[in-house]
């Protein structure tokens, strides 16, 4: 509850900026439509309006501002247009309908969760190997860092094509791309967490003649939990982004990525924005769930 106030202030600021940007972005198309309907606009030449600045057109045609919020195909839809489309595609449509965002959201979410599980498992195993093996520390960690310098938009089509050539389609290729994005923050967080115990704590365990396995379960793993959960929050959001990006080169019309793609094909910016906002809500929900699990786990371990 203490964070509700600042969050609401930021949300209100985003909506205010969004509403202020709508007339500037939509003014040219709006003036063209109003001119065709018989209204007097300034300047009255389409060529002059094309070369004029957006803000200048808004100031010269302030009467057209309300119309910029009600365009059928706006460049930038107003927030209330996006909310209405979200309501229509989540509440008014059956969840089994291909026009429902819940239907498309579940397709993206299933790939996200599978990719997140794969990426988290791989990240934790790599982190343990890096901490306990100097060879892996010297060899794997640089490759893990280098892997994140490759743009996902460049590598996703190659993964899709290669996996399609061996008969893997649908969920698995998207999950692998999600795992590719989510494993890195888990590796970095877990390595930092597993190395968090200081020398005095490790020396104390040695005086008790504790084995490396006992040191891992009794000291290193508990110390890594805060770092792990922080990285999981980043990883699950990255996993969702990976699933959406993977749906773009797949060329399908399903999933939130497919919804955005079809929206761009037909110039339906409202559809793109509603899918984008739905994805953001989905990511916030996933991060919130991990935050709840984090509080419960750390409290149970006496770390919170």
Image (cartoon, rainbow, N blue to C red):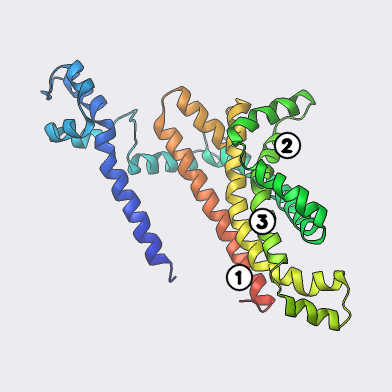
- Residue 110 in view in this figure: no
In percent of width and height, residue 249 lies at: 61, 27
Question: Disc 2 versus disc 1: distance between alpha carbons?
Answer: 31 Å
Sequence order check: which comes first, mark 2 or mark 1?
2
Please say if the residues under marks 2 and 1 sit with CB atoms less than 8 Å apart. Answer: no
Q: Is residue 217 above or below residue 176?
A: below
Residue 154 % position (x, y)? 61, 30
Compared with 38, 207 (above or below) is below
Above or below: residue 283 compared with residue 55? below
Residue carrying label 2: 172
Circle number at residue 295: 1
- The residue depicted at 12 percent of the width and 22 percent of the height is 43
- In the rendered view of the protein, which quadrant contains the N terminus? bottom left
Using a 10 Å C-alpha cutoff, classify the residue at mark 2 as few (fewer than 14 neighbours), some (14 to 19) or many (20 or more).
some
Compared across the picture, whether 120 is left or right of 22 comes to right
Residue 137 in percent (x, y) is at 76, 54
């Amino acid at each position: 509850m203490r964070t509700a106030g600042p969050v609401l202030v930021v949300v209100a600021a985003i909506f205010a900026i969004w509403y202020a940007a709508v007339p500037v972005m939509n003014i040219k198309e709006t003036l063209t439509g109003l001119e065709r309907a018989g209204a007097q606009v300034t300047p009255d030449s389409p060529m002059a309006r094309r070369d004029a600045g957006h803000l200048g057109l808004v100031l010269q045609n302030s009467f057209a501002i309300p119309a910029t919020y009600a365009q059928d195909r706006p460049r930038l839809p107003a927030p209330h247009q996006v909310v209405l489309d979200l309501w229509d595609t989540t509440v008014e449509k059956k969840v089994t309908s291909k026009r429902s965002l819940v239907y498309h959201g579940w397709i993206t979410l299933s790939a996200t969760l599978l990719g997140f599980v794969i990426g988290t498992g791989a990240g934790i195993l790599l982190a343990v190997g890096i901490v306990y093996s100097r060879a892996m520390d010297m060899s794997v960690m640089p490759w893990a860092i280098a892997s994140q310098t490759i743009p996902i938009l460049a590598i996703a089509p190659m993964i899709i094509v290669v996996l399609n050539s061996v008969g893997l389609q649908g969920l698995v290729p998207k999950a692998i791309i999600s795992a590719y994005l989510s494993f890195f923050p888990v590796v970095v967080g877990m390595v930092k967490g597993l190395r968090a115990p200081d020398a005095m704590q490790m020396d104390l365990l040695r005086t008790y003649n504790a084995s490396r396995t006992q040191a891992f379960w009794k000291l290193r793993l508990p110390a890594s939990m805060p770092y792990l959960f922080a990285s999981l929050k980043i990883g699950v959001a990255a996993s969702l982004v990976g699933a959406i990006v993977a749906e773009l080169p797949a060329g399908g019309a399903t999933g939130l990525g497919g919804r955005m793609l079809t929206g761009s094909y037909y110039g339906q910016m409202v559809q793109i924005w509603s899918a984008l906002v739905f994805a953001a809500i989905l990511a916030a929900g996933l991060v919130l769930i991990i935050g709840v699990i984090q509080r419960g786990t750390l409290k149970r371990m006496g770390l919170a």
